[in-house]
Image: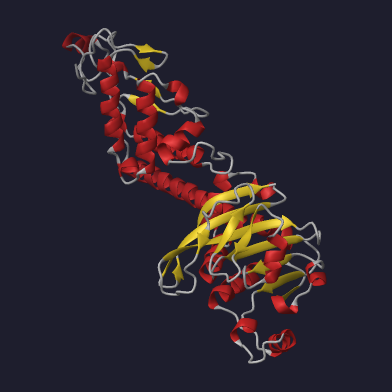
Amino acid sequence: MTLSVGAESMPEEFKLEGNIPSSEAAKEAVRQQLERVLLDTAFRNSKRYPSFLRFIVNQALQGETTSLKERVIGVEVFGRSPDYDSTQDPIVRVTAAEIRKRISRYYQDSLHENEIGIYLPLGSYIPQFEFPHSLSPDTAQPAAVAQPIQALQSAPKPAPTLPVPHRTRRRALWFGTALLLVLLFTSFALWRAHQRSLVDAFWAPVVDSSRPVLFCIADLSRYATPTPDTTPAAQERSAVNAPTLLTAEDTVPLLNFVSIVRPKVHSYRVQVERQTNFSDLAQGPTILIGAFDNKWTLFLTDPLRFHFVGDNSLSHVWIEDRQNPASRQWMTDDLSNANSTHKDYALIARFVDDNTSQVAVVVAGLGHQGTSAAGNFILSPQSLSQLERLNPNIWNSRNFEVIVETMVVNGHAGPAHIDAVHIW
């Protein structure tokens, strides 16, 4: 037997046992409703959300609710390995939260109020089903059926209403419009203030320091001005006397950082990495830009969980996870081809360095495009809101690392997306 949502009657065996329909007819009705929900614009343009919702609903209808755990869903729906670390890869929790919001918006539409409800409670991956009153077998007739004529005739007649003067109606309309505009403006102002506060929250440990801030940036001069004499002394003289060369990808984040930090700090200075020594790092907060062309980035991040690694020729470079050192998930080997289409990865870190006891901020990609994408990420309220949604308490944390990825097309980096977060 097949049921259609909104039918005028339901079979007597249509009941819920522990929130799971007991009959095949009822289960089929839920499956039809699931497909109806997935046709909505909130789901049909996505692959992740329909796969997630279809999996948990079908498992529940089959009575397999014990399998609806975060790790199982991560393996079955998102293809994660059975031993993946769900604390570092929150894709199941993030997807479930988004599905709850989209389902809520779907059922808020009055067009769907008489449909079977499919909900995902907070703190659980077991869906719940709710059958509208008009589909209940205990209801003699659906809500859409008109009341008997006799009942309507016996009902008390409403008192006649006096017409509202035109001026009064116009005044009420004006007041309502003004109130709506005030509410919209207030909401927008609060939203903008929160967006600005995300950037301030990221940079708070830097700007709150009374010490001078150091911008330590990559310098390509030692690589761009070779000398015929290959002795170490000659190479060092060439590097010292060479002009400072910066890439555009490093310069853009630098200018943006200075525009944010300069009005809020007591003083700051900009130095290339070859002009910087360890005592400079110990004088105050340091902002490090660039990875393999900035030795101080490699030095300060080397003890961290996420850090930079490359082979001897640097033809293969990657970000290594000390908890999974064999993985090459964040590796790229196509940096030499500026016009290629490839992924670049970057490390964003804010931490108190154990050696200097000063705050360090690292913005460094495997390639220059990764550095540029990471720089844009930490200055974008929209991007930082992604980080806040993953961990609302991240700004209160003393130290954290974030790995982001970007797609590089014809030498230009696209928006950065979060791959992993580590807080300590």
Question: Is residue 415 visible in the rendered structure shown here?
Answer: no
Q: Quadrant of residue 238?
A: bottom right
* Residue 353 picture location, percent across and down: 76, 58
Q: Is residue 226 left or right of 41 when viewed as pictured?
A: right
* Residue nearer the viewer, 224 or 11: 224
Q: Quadrant of the N terminus?
A: top left
* Residue 397 picture location, percent across and down: 70, 48
Q: Residue extending furthest left?
A: 149
* Residue 416 picture location, percent across and down: 50, 59
Question: Is residue 36 visible in the rendered structure shown here?
Answer: yes
Mark count: 0
* Residue nearer the viewer, 269 or 303: 303
Residue beneath the point at 37% across and 31% down: 55
Residue beneath the point at 60% across and 44% down: 391
The colour mode here is secondary structure
Residue beneath the point at 27% across and 13% down: 156
Q: Is residue 235 left or right of 183 when viewed as pictured?
A: right
> With respect to residue 98, does 131 lie above or below?
above
> With respect to residue 120, does 84 lie above or below?
below
Q: Residue extending furthest bottom?
A: 228
* Residue 223 picture location, percent across and down: 61, 82
> With respect to residue 98, does 6 lie above or below?
above
* Residue nearer the viewer, 244 or 197: 244
